[in-house]
Structures are given as C-alpha cells and as structure tokens.
Image (cartoon, coloured by chain):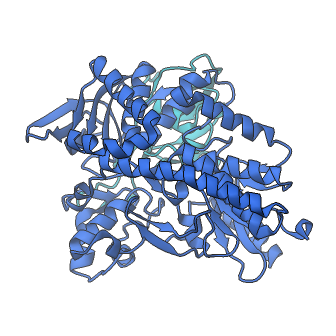
C-alpha cells in the first residue's frame, strides 16, 4: 500500500469526469478522462522528470515538473512502457497507460 | 487557372488563423489548416477537452462572446476547409521555382506537403526572465498557469504567487482567485509611476484598460497583496516551491510563502517557421525581438509566405483576428483570384486603420509594464539560464569574454545555450540580454538566435517515416 502523495496541481473544477487508472512509476494512480499526462502526474505527485544535465550551479538529476504547459518548453517529456517518449502536456492520459517519470530514461 | 494551384495553407488555428481561413473560404478556396492542438482556438481561446462542462463565461470571462463568435466562425468552416489538428509543421523549404515543401508530423506519422502559399499564424508564448529556483517543480509560465485552469480545471498549486509584468499577470491572478484558488501575491516589476505615465497611450483601448483596472481592484478588494515596482530575488525550495523572495522599491526584503509560482514578462512571438522559410528578420524595438519582415498587409519578402497575428509581434487576440482577415485578402490579391481586387484593397486599408489603434495601445502597455531587461542582463553568474542544457548565465558570459563570441549564435556554439530541446524559446530573450551586456553593445547588436529544423523534438518513428515520405516527393 502506498499512501497518496501530495500533488502539485489542485483540481478546482470539472471533477465529475469518468475516473481512469494509470500506472505511474509502477504504482496505480487515479486520474480523470480528459486529463493530460501532465495533469495526471501532477495531481498525484510533484515531479515529472529529472534533468539530464548539470553544470556549474546546476544539478543533474534535479526534479522538473514542466513549465509552459503548451508544448513549447519541452520540459515534460516522459517515457511510456511501450517504448514511446511523449510530451506530457500535449498527450491525453489513457486508462491502463504505464508512465515512467523520475526513473525513466 | 486558379483551379490548378495548390490550396493555400494556414499554420495555426487561433484568432488569426481562423479569420484567415474564413476569408479564404468566402473567396471560394478550400485552405488546409494545420494546428498542433486537438481543437481550434489557439492559446488564449483554448477550448477545453470534450466531456468538460464549464460555460464560456467561466473560461473566457469578458471575452466569452468574442470566443463564442470565433468558435462559431471556425465550426461553420467544417467541410469547407481541410483541418489537420494534432499536426506539427517541423520544417519547411521555400520553393525557388514552383512549390515549396512542408514537413508535417501527426501522431508519429510523417507527411510532406507541397505548397505555394502559406500563412503563418503561429502565435506567441510567454517571455521569461530566469531567476534562481525557476526550474523547481511548481514554477510555471503565466500562460501555462492559465492553460492548467482553462484546459484542465486545475490550479498549479494550493497557494500561487504571480510574478513578472504585463496584463496577463493580473488576468491570470484574477482568474485563479475567481475560480477559488488561493493567490499568495501579485508581484509586478513595473512601478506605479510607469502605469500613470502610460495612461494617454492606454486610452487607445479604454475597454481593455478598464478591465485591467477592474482585475487589479478586484484582487486588492479581496485582500490579495498586489505589490508594484518589486525586484524578484529567488524562488525558494528544494524539491518544490516553498516561497518567493523579493525586494520592495524601498529596499526591504520579503519572502512570500507559496507552493507554486506563475511567471512571465509579456509575450514572445513564435517565429521559427518564418526563419526556416528564409524570411528576412528585422529588429523590433517595441517587442524587443527580431521579427520576420512583412508589408502592411502581412506579405513577407519571400513569395508565397505570409504572416498574421501574434507570431509577428504580439498585439493580442482582437488584433490577430483583424490581421488574419487582412493577410488572407493579400494572399487572394497575389493569387489573382479576386475579380474585385479594388474592394480587397479598400478592406485592407480599413483594417489597417483599426489595427493602428491596437499598435498605439501596445505602445501604452509597454510603458505601463516595461520589460525589465536589466533583470536578465544582471543575472548572477551562477543562475541557471538554459533549463534544457543546464547552462548558467556565467557560462554564456564566459563564451563572450574568454572565447570571443561576438553574437548570440557564437555564444550558443561555445556554451550550448539555446541548443536544447526548446531551441531557446525559454532562455533566448534573457540570453540575448546577457550577451549584449557582456559585449557592452545595444541588444539589437547581440544578434538573432537562428531556428533549426525540427522546430520541436520528433519521435524517432516520425523521423524514419519522413525519410520515406520525402523520398516519394523527390
């Protein structure tokens, strides 16, 4: 049993939609039909991916959770278990999807 | 003769793209409308996914009737246009003689589209100035915070601070508070004196000005702290946001607790496709950005390439609708399709008179919410500037001072700034200020970050598919 972690996004409206279940980093999570993957991940947690690059002052592996939410910044790419890499803010979450965030490559 | 030509292509289905398509359909053409989003509307009038039930008033506020009119116009074009949603134009090659070629990708399938006339209505995204902590989970652009609410019914946090400047700062904070979210503070870098000085210019659009003031007073009346003339210092936190630190105009330091930050300093036009299509650019002092050159109707110097809306300098959605109609009329004139060329010219002139008002208003906005270029130029060496590649401001300065980069593309080659997945969309404006500062030259002499194909990352499956598609087109 894993307790539900604190989410970054907070639902304010449109909560009557059909629930769907997807797996995020191996754990079954609930989202709603019409959620983007970014929303599905961020109502269930605070991290979407880890930065690949470090530099002076920048830490490789630092947590990221998207930024522009409109497909411009490219900071919310995640891996699906079927091998696809997708941009979370422009991809709808689907029932049964298996997503890897922090542990994804 | 007209029937032998390729159908005109419109890239973008926001306010400009919609009105351009409508005008072309009225002239008897069947344009191809390509859009990255699943449904039309663009960013400001983004439509919520199917199954969502909020009424237009809840989503678009005072702009609900304009949004409804625009959606109605687009919906009436169904069957008269070739609408291709969920489709990215990732590269384009202008035709020297005859057709150019556009490279498309849609759900991992690539496609090459020959064209001879294209309108870019590619819009804009937030203009960002980095600060320490800006890559923490919980920090989003103002536009992104608005998308989360409009498109997903979510706030970006339990308690959101809004920082930056421009009309969107107040609009999104108001939309959040109105939807029931907790707004920790509105922190505007522009001082009150700038707003008072701007009043004459803002009078060019009294309605928009009145709405902006309404948002400000509405927020204040509900106890939301609204601070003017602030200097943002850092976003604090380890694995997420815990506070935003800022300095007031008298030098006092503050830390406002919050778990999310929405930031933005006006808008930055999306110009990559015009660049790949070899349109010449010119420095635009008002938008503080290099923009594709075009004539008074939206024709670029490259035959068959047209431009409308915020992608050629952000003047807002209302102006984009007018510019979309105008550029379509210009395209029709060039096509020789119009037997009523005189009336097209009259209509273009009438639209230009109306657009002049939006340009005056935009100048007023720049006075009310001046872009604080010094915040970018003065970024501390250790501050992360490029979030894709993890490049600091200091590394870019070193590229200039130690490796002799004399403009931004050389600085990019030496430091990798702007070379990452976003192609400088997020760091580009600030990187240019840093290069200019390190060189000791005015910003327009720092050069222009050139676009590269693909304009956005592609799935490998699409790249392979495109190779096959291109082979078919020779």
Could you say which chain is coloured blue in the image?
A: B
> What's the residue at 48%, 60% (across, down)?
B421
Left or right, residue B32 beside residue B402? right
Could you say where residue B306 lies in the image, as x and y percent from the top left? Answer: 65, 65
Which quarter of the rendered picture does the N terminus of chain B lie within? bottom right
Could you say where residue B113 lies in the image, as x and y percent from the top left? Answer: 77, 66
Residue A8 seen from this side: no
Query: Is B325 situated above or below B79?
Result: below
- Foreground of the two, A69 or A18: A69
- Foreground of the two, B206 or A40: B206
- Foreground of the two, B141 or B191: B191
Left or right, residue B440 beside residue B204? left
Can you tell which quarter of the image residue B5 is in?
bottom right
Which quarter of the rendered picture does the C terminus of chain B lie within? bottom right
> What's the residue at 53%, 63% (across, down)?
B271
> What's the residue at 73%, 58% (across, down)?
B344
Chain A takes which shade in the image?
A: cyan
Residue B214 seen from this side: yes
Could you say where residue B124 lies in the image, as x and y percent from the top left? Answer: 50, 52
Q: Kindly give the residue lying farthest to the left in the view shown.
A: B251
- Foreground of the two, B354 or B253: B354
Left or right, residue B238 beside residue B113? left
């Amino acid at each position: 049993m894993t307790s539900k972690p604190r989410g970054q996004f907070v639902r304010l409206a449109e909560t009557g939609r059909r629930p769907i279940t997807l797996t995020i980093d191996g754990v079954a999570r609930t989202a709603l039909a019409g959620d983007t993957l970014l929303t599905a991940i961020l109502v269930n947690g605070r991290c979407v991916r880890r930065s690949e690059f470090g530099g002076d002052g920048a830490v490789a592996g630092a947590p990221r959770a998207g930024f522009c939410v409109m497909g411009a910044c490219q900071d919310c790419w995640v891996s699906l278990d079927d091998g696809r890499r997708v941009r979370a803010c422009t991809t709808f979450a689907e029932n049964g999807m298996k997503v890897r965030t922090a542990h994804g490559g | 003769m007209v029937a032998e030509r390729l159908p005109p292509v419109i890239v973008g289905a926001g306010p400009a793209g919609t009105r351009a398509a409508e005008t072309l359909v009225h002239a008897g053409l069947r344009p191809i409308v390509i859009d990255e989003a699943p449904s039309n509307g663009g960013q400001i009038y983004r439509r919520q996914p199917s199954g969502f039930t909020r009424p237009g008033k809840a989503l678009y506020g005072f702009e609900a009737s304009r949004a409804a009119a625009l959606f109605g116009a687009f919906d009436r074009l169904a069957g008269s246009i070739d609408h291709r949603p969920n489709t990215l134009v990732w590269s384009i090659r202008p035709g020297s003689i005859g057709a150019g070629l556009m490279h498309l990708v849609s759900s991992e399938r690539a496609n090459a589209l020959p064209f001879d006339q294209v309108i870019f209505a590619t819009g804009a995204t937030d203009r960002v100035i980095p600060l320490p902590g800006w890559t923490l989970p919980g920090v989003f652009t103002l536009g992104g915070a608005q998308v989360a609410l409009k498109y997903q019914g979510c706030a970006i946090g339990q308690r959101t601070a809004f920082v930056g400047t421009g009309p969107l700062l107040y609009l999104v904070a108001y939309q959040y508070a109105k939807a029931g979210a907790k707004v920790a503070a509105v922190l505007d870098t522009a001082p009150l004196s700038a707003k008072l000085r701007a009043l004459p210019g803002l009078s060019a659009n009294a309605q928009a000005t009145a709405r902006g003031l309404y948002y400000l007073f509405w927020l204040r009346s509900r106890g939301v702290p609204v601070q003017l003339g602030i200097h943002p210092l850092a976003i604090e936190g380890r694995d997420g946001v815990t506070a935003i630190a800022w300095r007031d105009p008298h030098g006092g330091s503050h830390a406002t607790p919050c778990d999310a930050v929405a930031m933005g300093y006006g808008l930055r036009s999306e110009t990559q496709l015009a660049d790949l299509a070899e349109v010449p650019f010119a420095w635009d002092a008002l938008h503080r950005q290099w923009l594709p050159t075009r004539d008074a109707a939206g024709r670029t110097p490259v035959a068959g390439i047209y431009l409308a809306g915020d992608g050629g300098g952000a003047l807002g959605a209302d102006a984009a609708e007018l510019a979309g109609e105008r550029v379509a009329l210009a395209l029709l004139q060039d096509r020789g399709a119009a037997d009523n060329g005189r009336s097209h010219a009259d209509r273009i002139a009438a639209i230009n008179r109306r657009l002049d008002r939006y340009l005056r208003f935009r100048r007023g906005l720049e006075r009310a919410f001046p872009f604080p270029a010094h915040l970018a130029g003065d970024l501390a060496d250790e501050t992360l500037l490029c979030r894709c590649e993890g490049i600091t401001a200091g590394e870019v300065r070193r590229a200039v001072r130690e490796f002799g980069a004399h403009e931004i593309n050389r600085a990019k080659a030496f430091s990798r700034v702007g070379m990452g997945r976003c192609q400088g969309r997020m760091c580009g404006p600030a990187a240019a200020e840093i290069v200019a500062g390190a060189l000791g030259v005015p910003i327009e002499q720092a050069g222009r970050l050139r676009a590269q194909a693909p304009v956005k990352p592609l799935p490998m499956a699409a790249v392979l598919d495109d190779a096959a598609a291109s082979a078919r087109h020779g």
